[in-house]
Amino acid sequence: IGLRSGAGSQKRSELRREGGDRSARTRVAVGKRRRCTRSECNTCGFRTATSIIYKPKTQSTMAEEGDANNSTTYGMTNPGVAAIKPPYHTTKDHFHEYINSGRNKDLNVADKDNLKDGEAIEGACDSPEHKAKKIKLEESDENESEKDNGELCQNKGEHKQNNKKARGQNKNRPHMKPKHYEYDRKLCTSVCQEPPRKCYFGDKCRFLHDVSKYLESKPSDLGDHCYLYNTYGKCRYGVTCRYAKSHIGPDNKNLVNEDLMKTWEKTVIVRNSLSKELQQVLRKKKFYFNKSEQYLKASNKDNKSKCAEEQAIVGTAMEMKLPISDSNITVEENDSSVGSQDNIMAGPQSLSCTENTLDDGHPPGEKQRTVELKETTIRSGTDAVKAKTVKDDKLITSAITLGVVTDEDIIKLRSCEKKQLNFKDKLYLAPLTTCGNLPFRRICKSFGADITCGEMAMCTKLLQGQSSEWALLKRHYTEDVFGVQLEGAFPDTMTKCAELLNQNIDVDFVDINVGCPIDLVYHKGGGCGLMNRLNKLEQIVKGMNSVLDVPLTVKIRTGVYEKVNIAHKIIPNLRDCGLSLITLHGRSREQRYTKLSDWKYIDYCAQLANPMPLFGNGDILSFEDANRAKAETRVSGVMIARGALIKPWIFTEIKEQRHWDISSRERFEILQDFRNYGLEHWGSDTQGVEKSRKFLLEWLSFLCRYIPVGLLERLPQRINERPPYYLGRDYLETLMASQNVSDWVKISEMLLGPVPPNFTFLPKHKANSYK
C-alpha cells in the first residue's frame, strides 16, 4: 500500500504499537494512487487518493464472524491451499518442532496400540541418528543461500530464475540399489536352497558358503513373526530372512508347517513369471513370431502400394504445379485381419465369415513350403511353449498345438469372437509407474477396485528377456480383471511383443500407452509421441489386434501441446481399428499434471467414441468427483490414478457414497499391509526389505497430501489444493502429514526397522518433498 506523506509512516507505527496480526484487521479503504475507473474519465489521466483507516478486530468480533469468514480470509491469502479448521492451523516452525520434540514420547504410546503381530519399534526411536536421516534437499539449501544473498543480487532475471519452484524429476538423485546392501557378506543361493546344492561357480564364487560366518555379520532381526511363515507355512528365504528366528530351528534348519502349506498347494499365488528357458530363447533371438511376420509382410505390401500412389500424386502435382495437401495423398488402408467396431459390437446375425484363410495366413489353394519339424515342449510356469527345430536352427514358435487339431487351429479367430469384457461403470485403477506395483494393487483391490493394470513395460526390453521388465507383468490371484500396459514406437516390436505375451502370460486385456509425457519416451516416438504419428499408431493397433486373443485398449491424453487438442481427431480412427476401450486423460503432455482436467472435452470425445466405451481420467479424489464426472459427461466409467495414491480407500468411498474419516490407526494398518505384501513380493531378506522400503517411501510422498475429513472446513478435498501446515488429532496423524523426507524415513523405520548406514532417498518428483 503506497502512502504519500509522513502521516502514513506515523500511522503504520501506531498500528505496530497496537499489535495484532495483519490478517486480523479490516481494511476500510484502499490506500493507493489509482486511476479513475469512470468511463468518461478513461483518457483524462485524473488520479484520486483515499485515506487509510484500519480498524483492529477484537476477539468478540472474530468469534461472531465464525469459521467461514476465517476460511475465506485464509483462502484469499493462500490460494491453492486447502481450508483447514482454525483450531488445527499451525506454523511451519511449530509443526516441525512438535514432530521433533514429541517423537520419543507420543510415538511410543501410539505404536503400542497400532502395531500388529507384536512388532517392535526400537529402530524408530532408539536407533542411532544416521547422517542420511538428516536429509536436506538441494533446492532448500539453494533457496536459503539465495535468501541471505538476495540483497547483493543485482541481476533480477538471474535471481528470479534461481527462485523457481521445484518441478520435474530428480533425475540425478543419489540412491543405492537394494541388491548392493550386504554385497560383500551375502550368503550364496546354493546354500539357502533345500536341500543345499553344489555351487556352480565353485571357489570363484564371491558370496559366503559358511552359514555360521554369515550369521555373525547378519543384521539383527526386525521382529519375532515372519509374515511368509505365518501365512503360507514356509519362508523360502531361510536363514537370510530378517524375521528368521520365528522359523529357524536347531542346526539353522528352516522349519515348515506342512498343514498350512497344504491349503495353498492348488493355488497359484503369482502368475506371469519369466522362466529361465524362455529367457534364454529370447536372449538368443530364437523365438519365431509366426503371426507377426505374416501381418508385417502384408502391411509392407500395402505400404509399398501406398507409397507408389503417393509418388504418382506428387509427380502429377509437380507437373501441374498444384499444392499438395494431406487430403490429396490420403489412401484408405484395408486390413482383412482386423474387424471394425461394428463387427465387434454386432450380434449373432453378423457372424458370417467373409475370409477364407488358414492359420498361417495363406489361402487354401496356395502351395506352401514344407519342412520337417522336430517338436519339443518347454514349460514356462503354467504356460506351454512349443519348440521347433528347422534343420539345425532352433526356433521357438508361438503356436501351441497340443492334442487333436480342431477348427480353432485352422480357422482364424475374428475380432467379434475374441474374449469380451464389460467395462461399464467399473472402477479402474490406472497403471502407475513406480507406485503401481503389485503390493499397492493388492491394497487398492481390497478397498474395491474392479480393474487393475500393471506398470508401463517397454516392449523392446520384454523382447530381450529382461527380468526387471517382466516383473512388471506379474499378476496376483486376487486380481480378477487384470491387464498389462505396453509402450513402444514401432509396429514391428509392438506386434511381436503382443504375440509373445499372448502365449506366455495370463491377462484379460492389453493396453497401449499413448499418454506417457516423459522425455525419454516421447523423443523416441513412444507415449504421447504416437499422437503425432497417427499412421504408425493405427498400424500398431491393427497389428496387435491381429495377434491377440484378448481385448486391446489405449490410454491417451488430450494432445501434446496445451490448448491444442487433437484427441478428437484420433479417437474415430482408433474406434474403427477395433479397440475395446479408450481412456482419455483430460490434460496435454505440456500440462503434465498442472491445471484442472478438461472434462468438457472428455465428454465431447465420449460422444465421438460411441458405441465404443470411453473412460475419463483426471482430478478424481472423492465420490462427489466421480458422481459429477458420470452425471455431466457420457463416459462409461472413470479411471483413478493420483487419487488412489493419495487415498487408496477412495474406491470404498465411491461404492458406499460416503466420506470416510479414516483414523491414523487405520491408515497405519494399511501401511502394515503394504509392508507384508512387499516382503512377500520382493523378499524378506535384506535386499527385499530395502526394496520394500524404497517403494514405501515413494508412496508416502503422495500419502502425505491427504487431509483427514474431520479437519477440513469444506468437503471434499480438491486434488489441486496443497495441504497447509496443521496439527492432527494425534501425533501419528501429524507425522503422516509431514512433507519432509526425514519424517517419511521415520515412518518406514516403524515398519521395517532402522535404515542401513549408507541409506539415502529422494522422491522421484522434486515437488513431493520440502521443509
Image: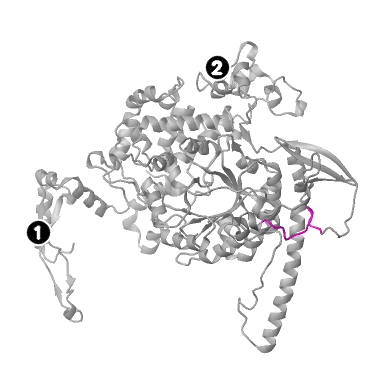
Circle 1 is placed at which residue position?
53
Q: Quadrant of residue 133?
A: top left
Q: Quadrant of residue 603?
A: bottom left
**In the shown orientation, is residue 687 left or right of residue 699?**
right
Rendered location of residue 495, percent (x, y) = 69, 54
**In the shown orientation, is residue 640 left or right of residue 144?**
right
Q: Toward the viewer: 417 or 277?
A: 417
Residue at screen point 54% across, 46% down: 433
- Residue furthest out toward the front: 349
Q: Are marks 1 and 2 in contact (CB under 8 Å)?
A: no
Residue at screen point 11% across, 54% down: 13
Rendered location of residue 735, percent (x, y) = 36, 34
Tell me, for residue 246, which label it has, or none.
2
User: Which residue range is magenta in the image?
Assistant: 351-362
In what element is the residue under mark 1? loop
In what element is the residue under mark 2? helix
